[in-house]
Image: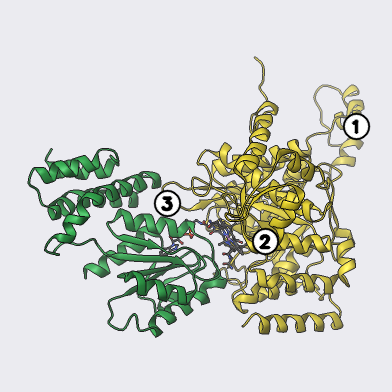
Amino acid sequence: MSILNELAKSIEEGKLQEIKEQVSHALAEGLSAEEILEKGLMQGMDVVGKRFAAEDMFIPEVMLSARTMHEALLVLRPLLEQGDQNVKMKGKVLLGTVEGDIHDIGKSLVEMMFVANGFEVVDIGENISPQAFVDAIKEHKPDVVGLSALLTTTMPAMARTVEAISAAGLRDDGRLKVIVGGAPVTEEFAREINADYYGENALDGVEVVKQALAG
Amino acid sequence: MTYMTPKFVFSPAEQAVLKEKLFTLLEQKGVRMDHAAVVEILAGAGANVDGATKMVRFPRKLLEDLIGKIPKQVLLAARDPRFDLEIPRADGGFYVRTGTGAPGFLDPEDGEYHRTRIRDVATWAKLVGSLDHINFCAFPSPVDVPGKTADIHALREMLTYCPKHIWIQPYSGESIPYLFQLAELAAGGAAELGKRPLVSFITCSLTPLDYKYMDLEVIVQACRRGVPIHACSLPSAGGTAPVTMAGTVLLAAAEVMVLLAVAQAIQPGTPGIATPLIFSMDMLTGRSLQSSTEAIQGAAAAVNFIKTSFDIPVHTYGYGADSPDIDGQAQSERSLLSLMVALAGSDILGGAGQVEVATAISPLQLIVDNDLAGMVQQLRAGLSLSDETLAWNDLLNLQPGGHFLNNDHTLMHCRSAFKGRTFVRQSRETWLKKGQVDFLAKAKDIYDEIMAGEHAGLISQEVGQEMAGLVQTADRQLGV
Ligand code: B1M
């Protein structure tokens, strides 16, 4: 098996202990950080995503793969950041549950799926006010902001948050994308409140964002 | 061959282990509480409190003392005293509560699914008033009223139309005082509410081992008024609790006992009902499930453990489905769940009428659940044995062959078999000839019959006006 295939396999199988050494070995063999990420690690993550979608991998197994990816990136990230910028992480996502809502399990799953797909995630927690979202966006400069709401009664807070983000001028250049989700949230509601995307579940949310950022 | 007692709950020896671990967990690990006044009361009672982390640890002796004060009997009073519920039930059976908080409604009027509206809340209340085996009512979550006061609007509807006891699930800390005030108006004052609590409140832990301000505030206010609480924990095995159900049962029981102990520390004798509501996470999709095999086992084990170890009233889901519709799957799920938890000794079986893991309710399902409840009530009670039930005289006088159709004994007892109104028991031939009416079509007939009946509001004009004024104030004050 080629070094790149081995790396992909290690991500799929969640070889948390071995991965750093494998990445270092690949670098020593002369492979570039970009190649290792794109043709090795991300290939493994793609398989994980597909197997999860096909209900062939369980959540804790996906989480182990995501953690393994994270470990690998500890070695690669400094090199990637020095590199020619052709290859970057997929993007930075800022996640939070809206004001008045403390349900966080769905958000944690969404976070897991983003991490597993090579995104950098900042989770700002639950019961987050519109202003706190705005402040966090200014601080972390994400590509995507994800809002979660589990109560019909907190859906208005989701609308207010999207409004506040727009009013603060953070969407003016069209680069920041807003995705919303959670059990009572629908595609129609997402449109109504002027969000960019709707994620029906964790996997769907990541796919939508991946496609949008790729396009 | 010896027949083994089916092991669907923990054995006495296992329960002793669980009980030890419960005390150890709460003594060594403790819980976090976001309510300064409650933490202060607990500290005064002898709990070990860490002000910086808000962690509260319960020395065993303190917890035992507080648990010892939990009343063994609870009255859930009703607008119409004929529907008062005394727990535990004298015949050892259970009471049935409807599903709570559902934002989705499967409407029998048009067969469509839509978001719950305030008029659906009234429909729900009227149905409960007319179904014999549905003993008290929780309100669903309407979306056509302001979100911040949706619970307040829904409670007003309930108090207006439901003659039975009402369980209140507040949606925010700010609405709690209004909910109590509405209940007081309906009861005729705070003292009357305390004497005959027409409502009870739920209070929940934030699993694992965390307690929010709102839920602790519910306890404070309930204690002040002598209103019963349903102390809930909603763990999701694999998500917010151990993936192995035994660990989830232990965690839920520990969290529930803390809520009940808090109430006793504030006001000894406050009525409380231990309410572990057990979920398991589908490890393939992340969905919370309430009727998976494991969740059913967990619910049965949890109520049985708490009831046998602490001898207090217990309550869990008895109905509900993971299926999003009122299909065959939904019926199997609720049948298995209700039978298991009833046999495990639950005093209250909650969730009647709900599907899609507590996010939708269906009036037709509620009518079917009414039948299932009657059936399970009888199954739980078992057969009685006497010369009369043996038909001993008839047997002694029996000639081989023949039949019992003409016997006085048969005539006397022929009406006693349980008959659910929604069950279809025809031959295929008859069923086809009679238009293939299935159980849901029968439920629809019952629904039409109930809704066509007289449902006068239960509130006088004067109290109705006061309630309307209070709801308006709430809308204004809570910033609608
Ligand atoms: C950014 O992009 C995206 C994309 C996709 C996104 C996304 C973001 N966010 C989510 N998704 C999507 O992907 C995820 C994975 O595929 C999915 O996430 P979900 O979050 O939907 O799914 C999770 C993985 C599993 N689902 C869950 O974890 C929720 C399960 C249910 C049973 C539930 C639970 C467990 C809890 N609760 Co809550 N609770 C209920 C829930 C009923 C239900 N079946 O949903 C619901 C949502 N609760 C409700 C209520 C009323 C409440 N709860 C409350 C509290 C709690 C607990 C603390 C007890 C606990 C939460 C524990 C926790 N750490 O989150 C209170 C509110 C507190 C608050 N201020 O937020 C309280 C008000 C009750 C009370 N008085 O205590 C009801 C909502 C009613 C309404 N009006 O909408 C409810 C339907 C139950 C009910 N029937 O009463 C998708 O929606």
The amino acid type, in three-letter code, at marker 1 is Glu
Nearer mark to the viewer, of 2 and 3: 2
Q: Residue furthest left?
A: A30
How many tags in the picture?
A: 3
**Which residue is located at x 14 percent, y 55 percent?**
A34
**Which residue is located at x 80 percent, y 47 percent?**
B70
Residue under label 1, please give it.
B388
* Residue A146 shows in this picture: yes
Residue A98 badge: none
Relative height, residue B27 to residue B290 (above, below)? above
Q: Is mark 3 within 8 Å of ligand 1?
A: yes
- Of labels 2 and 3, earlier in sequence is 2
Question: Given the image, what chain letter belongs to the residue carrying mark 1?
Answer: B
- The reply, left or right, for residue B115 in relation to residue B191 is left
Q: Quadrant of the C terminus of chain B?
A: bottom right
Residue B285 badge: 3
Residue B36 badge: 2
